[in-house]
Image: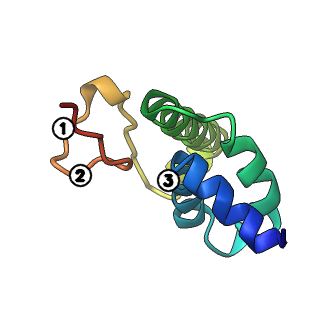
Amino acid sequence: MTEDASKWFEYIRNPHIFAVKQYLIDVLKERYGKHDDYVVRLSMAISTAEDVKKFGELIADIYESGFLRAYGEYQEELKKLGYNLNVKPEAQKQKIDAPPIFPQEKSG
């Protein structure tokens, strides 16, 4: 079996692989390519819609942590430049009416 056929077989066997892969392509853009083989292997362990949701939450937490770290490191420099920025925790933000990152499966 060719490598491409093998990947398609995995997508058919576990359609969540495609959701995770597409999400990471959207996030990483041109940096995704070097991670493709690993993402496919990692995605094989994501077998339910709940796993996909939790994976998305993990990625969002990683982004938020990185942003808050960078903000904290550069906060003084921003103040020197005259910027006064406020970062609020997720709970205090206004709810944005946007479609979910991963569409929910309808039960029933």
The quadrant in which residue 45 appears is top right
Q: What residue did someone put label 3 on?
A: 19
Which sits in the foreground, 32 or 105?
105
Residue 70 at x, y = what percent?
A: 63, 44
Q: Is residue 22 above or below residue 73?
A: below
Label 2, label 3: how many angstroms apart (C-alpha)?
A: 15 Å
**Front: mark 1 or 2:** 2
**Front: mark 2 or 3:** 3
Q: Secondary structure at mark 2?
A: loop
Q: Please, what is the three-letter code of the amino acid marked with disc 3?
A: Ala
Which sits in the foreground, 95 or 80?
95
Which sits in the foreground, 49 or 29?
49
Q: What residue did someone put label 1 on?
A: 95
Horizontal side, residue 23 vs residue 9: left or right: left
Label 3, label 1: how many angstroms apart (C-alpha)?
A: 24 Å
Q: Residue at x 38, y 47 (%)?
A: 102
Residue lying farthest to the top in this orientation: 91
Q: What residue did someone put label 2 on?
A: 99
Q: Which mark is residue 33?
A: none
Residue 29 at x, y = what percent?
A: 61, 71
Q: Is residue 1 above or below residue 13?
A: below
Q: Secondary structure at mark 3?
A: helix
Residue 105 at x, y = what percent?
A: 29, 40
Which sits in the foreground, 30 or 69?
30
Residue 5 at x, y = what percent?
A: 73, 70
Horizontal side, residue 85 vs residue 42: left or right: left
- Packing grade of label 3 (10 A; few <14, some 14-19, many >=20) is some
Q: Secondary structure at mark 1?
A: loop
Q: Is residue 88 above or below residue 59?
A: above
Q: Residue at x 22, y 38 (%)?
A: 106
